[in-house]
Image: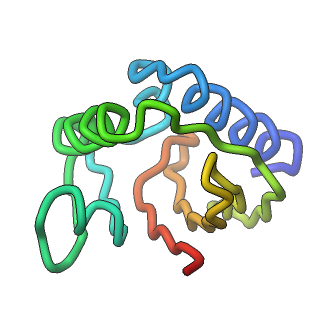
Amino acid sequence: MTKEEASHLANHWVAAWNAHDLDAIMSHYDDAIELTSPVAAQLLGTHDGRVVGKAGLRAYFQRGLQAYPDLRFHLEDFLWGVNSLVLYYTNQKDTRTAEFMELTETGKVARVVANYSA
């Protein structure tokens, strides 16, 4: 991954979320996606906050968009690696979030670990 590719992915990802466009959001993820998030644990009532597979992720994101109709992200920064990306952003409540994303060879997100400020 180049810095330009990372920037494009980061900005497109944020724009898709800000548009609440579920299809555009989902276009970033691999079919075998695995996501771990404290928000997933809360919204889904699970102890591990783990979501596996694109259908499960879509259902989780759809639930999140319904639960937070004013959801909005502001990209603060991104860090990129050989096959990974970390997005650092704030939301409409000024909560800081960092998401580690591991990418496939085709540039789709295969694994996400989300971390939130207090």
Question: Who is closer to the viewer here, 99 or 84?
Answer: 99
The vertical placement of 104 against 97, above or below, is above
Q: In the picture provided, is 10 more to the left or to the right than 36? A: right
Q: Position of residue 73 (x, y in %)?
A: 65, 43
Q: How is the image coloured?
A: rainbow
The vertical placement of 19 against 106, above or below, is above
Question: Who is closer to the viewer here, 47 or 94?
Answer: 94
Q: Position of residue 63 (x, y in %)?
A: 24, 38
The vertical placement of 118 against 30, above or below, is below
Question: Who is closer to the viewer here, 100 or 73?
Answer: 73
Residue 62 falls in which quadrant of the image?
A: top left
Question: Who is closer to the viewer here, 9 or 41?
Answer: 41
Q: Residue at x 62, y 36 (%)?
A: 13
Residue 34 falls in which quadrant of the image?
A: bottom left
The vertical placement of 47 against 32, above or below, is below
Q: Position of residue 52 (x, y in %)?
A: 20, 55
Q: In the picture provided, is 66 more to the left or to the right than 114? A: left
Q: In the picture provided, is 33 more to the left or to the right than 94? A: left
Q: Residue at x 41, y 54 (%)?
A: 110
Q: Position of residue 83 (x, y in %)?
A: 63, 61
Quadrant of image for the C terminus: bottom right
Q: Residue at x 70, y 56 (%)?
A: 89
Q: How many marks?
A: 0
Residue 79 falls in which quadrant of the image?
A: bottom right
